[in-house]
Amino acid sequence: MLEDDPLEIRPCTHAGGWLEYARQTGRAGLVAGADTDASRLAAFGGRYPSCALYNDYKEMLTTVRPDIVSICAYATDRHQMVMDAVSSGVRGIWCEKAFGTSMTEALEMKKACDENGVSLVVSHSRRWHPAYRKAKEMIDAGAIGTLQSITSHFSGSLIHTGTHAFDVLRWFLGRPVWVEGATSGLKGGNLWDAPDDCGGRAHIQFENGSYAAVHGESKRYFIFEFDIIGTDGRIRIGNNDLLEYYTPAKSTHYTGLKELYKKEFPDFLDKNVWVEAAGSLTGLLDGKTENPSPPEAGCGALELALAVHLSAQMGAGRVHLPLTELDLRVRSR
């Protein structure tokens, strides 16, 4: 239904991404859809009239025998759907985030895919976003010197929205070693704050000495951005086309000092993340590409979000990683 939003840059859904990828390459076709909500299923059929429709995804898996499935249901349903899809013999899975509601679920999904040779990509969409990929390339090339810290701001909740942010932090900063955090305890500020998920904040220390400050409390507006600080520069990136690059130069205000001044952000090729994700998965099935967003990334982002919840339960106590409380469960949409 997001494809109906006149403000969205389309395609902006799994289905839209698959159709555009098929149009560009001829490599895939959208053949079936399943939903327990009859009105949503009918709307899907109206948009994609060539698709077979099912109100039971298990029946779809056994009848259609698809090569690839996109799992877009709520986080509380994804574990069982992934396990059933693997058992049905699919070759590839494009799974929405968060990657389950507990580490037990996430690790079981990863193990099932590994043992059955199923390629799975987790839909952490910034992994395919050309601006984020360019920022990562610049950081790795030393464009802002030694990376010291990242401050993350987002609206919403630690699991539903936050796993996107935690994935970017792990992608840019590497392996986290401990987390201290608190939850806001507020639910309902956004329609996605349900049923256990809520906002929060955290300090995260990484193995390479860098750290992240996370501000993810619920708000009455949408924000999703990162302020990336290095010894020799700064990058700001986020929604609403926020993309800024700063380097030090002779100060125009203080003699003998340098300050940061905005520079032109290097050119990058603009691509659609949904089409790119579809291409990544088919490339994995062909054995031609590496997985830009593997199950390990899904596990890692979920682990950070759960660690904040655990720290909050401990009164903002320090939680060392990897997380040992594997059955800690936070239900999210």
Image: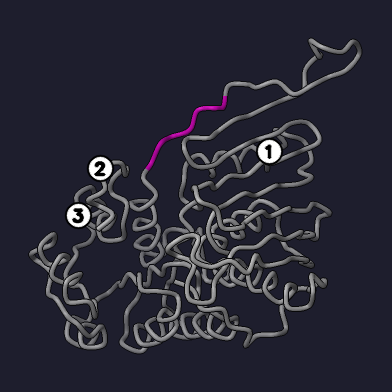
Alpha carbons under labels 3 and 2: distance apart: 27 Å
Q: Position of residue 83 (x, y in %)?
A: 41, 86
Q: Residues within 10 Å of mark 1 (few under 14, many from 20)?
A: few
Residue identifier under label 2: 6
Q: In the rendered view, does 11 fall on the left or right side of 305?
A: left
The magenta stretch spans residue 308: no
Is residue 239 found left or right of 230 in the rendered image?
left
- Mark 1 → mark 3, Cα distance in angstroms: 36 Å
Start-end of magenta stretch: 265-271
The tag on residue 195 is none
Give the quadrant of residue 333. bottom left
**Who's the residue at 78% across and 66% down the image?**
180
Location of mark 3 (residue)? 26
Q: Nearer the viewer, mark 3 or mark 2?
A: 2
Side of 116 relative to 12 (left or right): right
Residue 27: % across, % down? 23, 58
Q: Which mark is residue 141?
A: 1
